[in-house]
Image (cartoon, rainbow, N blue to C red):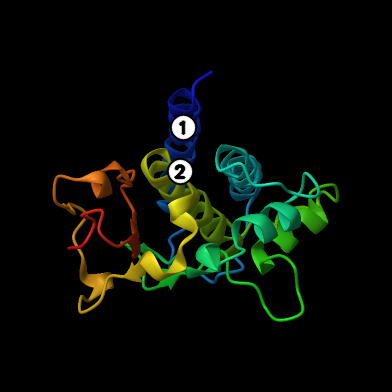
Amino acid sequence: MTNENIRRIMLNAYFETEQQFIEITRLIPLDNSPDTYSPRLYDILQSLCGQVENLMRILCEKLNLEYENKNFPSYYKTLNQTGVLEFQIIDLLNGSKAYIPFGIDKGKDTPNWWKGYNDTKHDLPNGYKQGNLNNTTFALTAVYALNCLFAYAEILGKDILNKEKWIHVTGIGLNTRGLNITTSESIGDMRPRSEILFPVSYFKGTGAEI
């Protein structure tokens, strides 16, 4: 299977999960308490976290990066060696905030949303509480960020690990954006177009500047 086929399959999986998220947030609005949970949100979280782990592994292998173990902490350490993962910011277009899905608190080796999922995935029904708006939204933005990185990697390869080339969109009220966002005709346009998310971080020189 070619890299492009793998990318398309993973991207289609993301878009299917994004639609499920959009549907349930019509029933559980995003302005509810972040710890609002449901079994449906938990199922979405399970799918998203599976996509996160596999996308990280696929990116490591595509970029010929060696990892110690087949798990999130190892993939994270490998891909974030220059700080690129934690630099990613994703804006929720119909919400009130932007997310840094790969931000990790000092002294920890995984983000809080991943720990919540991982610690309780075999502990139902208590584990359903981790299927909340906060964890699920963070996981959604993580998968989207990884798909954006994958799109860049198809053209730029290991260059995407050069943190000096990554910058953030500035001078724009991100939360007042409309859903129809355009970029110039360029490599930057390869980033997937989400209905509800926008990648604030972009690789300089690819035309993603707006």
Please give the label number shown on residue 39. Answer: none
Identify the mark nearer the N-term, 1 or 2. 1
- Pick the residue in front: 96 or 187: 187
In the orientation shown, which residue stands out farthest toward the right? 123
CB contact under 8 Å: marks 1 and 2: yes
Q: Label 2's element?
A: helix
The quarter of the picture where the C terminus appears is bottom left
In x, y percent, where is residue 111? 66, 67
Q: Quadrant of residue 12?
A: top left
Task: Give the quadrant of the N terminus.
Answer: top right
- The reply, left or right, for residue 177 in relation to residue 97 is left
Q: Quadrant of residue 138?
A: bottom right
* Mark pair 1, 2: CA separation: 7 Å
From the image, tell me which residue sits under label 2. Answer: 150
Quarter-wise, where is residue 64 in the image?
top right
At x 20%, y 55%, the residue is 207
Q: Where does label 1 land, which residue? A: 7
The three-letter code of the residue at mark 1 reads Arg
73 vs 41, left or right, is right
Q: Indicate left or right for 45 with 97 as reference.
A: right
The residue sitting at 68% across, 68% down in the picture is: 112
Question: Looking at the image, which is closer to me, 87 or 124?
Answer: 87
Residue 170 in picture, x, y percent from top left:
25, 76
- For the residue carrying disc 1, how many other residues have a C-alpha within 10 Å: few (<14), some (14-19), or many (20+)? some
Residue type, mark 2 in image: Phe
